[in-house]
Image (cartoon, rainbow, N blue to C red):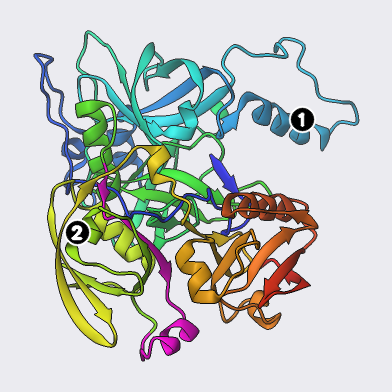
Amino acid sequence: MRRMRDFSRSYWLPLVAVVFGATALWQLAPTSSVAASPSVDEVAAGRLAGAPASFADIIAAIQPAVVNISVAGGAPRGVAGGEFEDFLKRFFDRGFSGRFDAPDVPKEPRFRGMGSGFIVAPEGYVVTNQHVVENASEIKVTLHDGKKLPAELVGVDEKTDLALLRVKSREALPYARFGDSETTRVGDWVVAIGNPFGLGGSATAGIVSARGRDIQAGPFDDFFQIDAPINQGNSGGPLFNLEGQVIGINTAIYSPNGGNVGIGFAIPSNLAGGVIDQLRATGRVERGFLGVTIQPMDEEIARSLGLKSETGALVASVVEGGPAAKAGVEAGDVIVAIDGDDIAQVKELTRKIAAMSPDAKAELEVLRNGKRKKLDVRIGKTPSESEAVRADAVSPAGGLGLTLSEITPEARERFGIPDEVQGAVVVGVDPASGAAEKGLQPGDVVVSVGQKKVASLEEAAREIERQKATERGSVLLRVVRGGDASFVAVPFA
């Protein structure tokens, strides 16, 4: 289970070229001669309505589709065997003065990672998290009845932390189907099933606490927050509704103390379904490409543009020859709607584009010089990763309340940054943050972090994360403004 010590941890993925193509609600149907068994939601249908007196029937119906996943090879970002052993040591050390050391357990266990997953087709397709199988040289799936099967990796998608495996079985396997996560409401009952601490199949129940959570895990964050307990080893496990349908994939927890505190996060099925569909078809995910660098709006930027509202996504730059450029989008435009749907924040535009396939047509509505303008755009195909990670990326700065960007020619001209100044330019400041209290503003250039010189956005972001890990509570930034440099101690949120 991916553990976060606060919500501001970021992978520093650029918000360049708002990307991602996905299909609508996805369901896998049998495509081979394997006899199909009933899906678990068909077994569970009609058993419960409203608040249940017991979850026993629903869990009995859906649990056979949930599997344990064990991996050998490089340790994944999820629960490694070493973490589980550390947990055991801490547990036993509470009651015994001696050091816990299990003599029967080898120092380097063969399988060094554990996680959960679920079968989504009788042919043996299994969904889990990418971080569960990351760097694995060998993957095994343990079914509900204890049978162990070798698994092949069909494909992964790092940006949504999803992976698709396949196991071969002579018998049709029980499988789960995706439900419509869009209809899931805050307060709805949910059941999470997984394999916490490698102890075996385990179920917990709770409610959806919130929707649309952005935990800074990637550009497509749109998590359910749930209070059903999720512990280490639950990564990749399914989140069911009371109809026995999967409406989420358990992925992360917020944990200030290393344990469950009732704040877990799951990837909604409507986002996951399109990704899994593409992985099954081609082993990879093709994403749509708009070809712009966008940044959040704030009160100061809105005022400088003569706008009354802070809603929308500000176009910082446009990729030459890209779809947006061909449609007539210009730097300084504020994208306020796409296909008639209002855009309040940067993430909303990201997710809207994420729902489109390459070559799809869309209508953008932008504010330019205070006037609304409609532009027709044909969504492009994502360039290679090396092309996509452009130098004009924009990223939030790990809990400081700042949004930083690479210093582009446009930024130098807009903010009057001298050619010799290198670093990361501030393009947004959260007015409620410590950075705002310290007087930082758009146009300031961060040239050193923690007394270490930084020459790019990537270096600044990495050093801020490193300083954050020291848990000092603040970081010392050297900032250049108008040719003058000064040090500013900025607290982490």
Q: Residues within 10 Å of mark 1 (few under 14, many from 20)?
A: some
Q: Which mark is residue 326?
A: 2
- Residue 161 visible to the viewer: no
Asked whether 211 falls inside the magenta stretch, the response is: no
Q: Position of residue 105 (x, y in %)?
A: 70, 13
Q: Which residue is mark 1?
A: 89
Whichever of labels 1 and 2 marks the residue nearer the N terminus, that label is 1
Q: Which amino acid does the dot numbered 2 rest on?
A: Lys
**In this picture, which residue range is highlighted in magenta?**
287-309
Q: Nearer the viewer, residue 54 or 164?
A: 164
Of all residues, the one furthest to the front in this rendering is 419
Q: Nearer the viewer, residue 235 or 381?
A: 381
Secondary structure at numbered mark 2: helix
- Vertical side of 246 occupied by 88: above or below: above
Q: Which mark is residue 237?
A: none
Indicate the quadrant where residue 51 lies: bottom left
Image quadrant holding the C terminus, namely bottom right
Please give the name of the residue rendered at 66% of the width and 52% of the height, measured from the top-left corner. Answer: 465
Q: Position of residue 314 (x, y in %)?
A: 37, 72
- Residue 380 visible to the viewer: yes
Disc 1 versus disc 2: distance between alpha carbons? 60 Å
